[in-house]
Image (cartoon, rainbow, N blue to C red):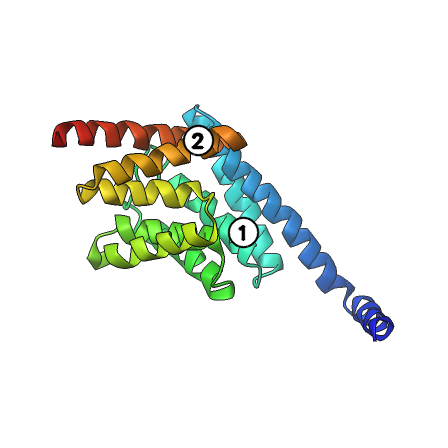
Amino acid sequence: MKRAFLILLGCWVLANPESLLAQQSSRSLTQDAMTECHNGRVDRDRASRVGHFEKGQALGEQAVALDDRSADAHFALFCNLGELMRIDGELSLTSVMGFRRMMNELDRTLGIAPDHLDAMSAKGAFLLRLPSLLGGNREKGEKLLQYVLLKSPQSVNARLSLAKSYCADGRHSEALSLASEALDLIQTHQWDDFTPEAEKVWAQLHANAGKAN
C-alpha cells in the first residue's frame, strides 16, 4: 500500500512540477516575509523598520501570488501590513483601504486554516481593540484569546492582549499576572521581537493599577 502511494506521489510530482515548485517557492518566500516582520519589530530605527515591513509585504505578496491557498503566506502578508499600519505605536485607521486589506488577509488566513493560532490571536486582539462599528466585540475577543492560551500556553500576544482588556475592566491583578508571564516567556525563549510591546504594556498596566489604587 505504501509502495503504491509513493508511486502515485511520484507520478503526480512528474506531472505537476510547476505546482510543486510554486509551493516550495511560496514557503520560502513566506519564511523570508516573516523574518522581515520579526526584524522590523526588533529594530528601533523607524526608517529601518519601515524598510523591513515593506520588504516583508512584497515577499508576502509574492508568496500569496504563487500559492493563494497557503494560510501561512496570507498571515505573513498580514503581519507586515499590520506592522506598517502601527509603525508609530498604535494602529492607524487613517487608511481605510489599508485597514480593509490587512483584515482581509487575516480573515483569508482563518478561512483557509480556522485553527491557525497566530491568526486567531491576532483576530482576538482586533476584536478587543476595534470599536463595534468596525466589527469589535470584547466578549468574543476575550473568549478567542482564552482559547488560544488553552491550546498554546506560550502565546505572548494572547497574554498581552488579554492583559490590556482585563486592565480596562479593572481586573488589574489578573492583568499584571498575564503581563508578567508574557515577560517571563520572552526572557526564557529569547523572543526579542516581543520585548518592546511587552515592556510598553507592562508600564501601562502598572500606571493604570497605580491610579486605581
User: Residue 96: x, y in percent?
Assistant: 30, 52
Mark 1, residue position:
61
Quadrant of image for the N terminus: bottom right
Secondary structure under the numbered disc 2 in the rendered image: helix
Horizontal arrangement in the rendering, residue 59 relative to residue 44 (left or right): right
Horizontal arrangement in the rendering, residue 43 relative to residue 4 (left or right): left
User: Residue 9: x, y in percent?
Assistant: 80, 69
Residue 137 appears in view: no
Quadrant of image for the C terminus: top left
Question: Where is 52 relative to 73, above or below?
Answer: above
Mark nearest the camera among 1 and 2 is 2
Residue at position x 45%, y 50% from top? 78
Q: Disc number at residue 39?
A: none
Work out whether residue 138 or residue 69 is closer to the camera in this orientation and state it: 138
Q: Residue furthest top?
A: 45
Callout 2, which amino acid?
Asp
Residue at position x 27%, y 40% from top? 174
Callout 1, which amino acid?
Glu
Work out whether residue 51 or residue 191 is closer to the camera in this orientation and state it: 191
Q: Residues within 10 Å of mark 1 (few under 14, many from 20)?
A: many
Q: What is the total number of numbered labels drawn onto the structure image?
A: 2
Q: Disc number at residue 184?
A: 2
Secondary structure under the numbered disc 1 in the rendered image: helix
User: Residue 167: x, y in percent?
Assistant: 22, 40
Question: Where is 9 relative to 189, above or below?
Answer: below
User: Residue 25: x, y in percent?
Assistant: 68, 52
Work out whether residue 195 or residue 19 is closer to the camera in this orientation and state it: 195
Residue at position x 56%, y 62% from top? 68
Residue 104 appears in view: yes
Horizontal arrangement in the rendering, residue 148 relative to residue 163 (left or right): right
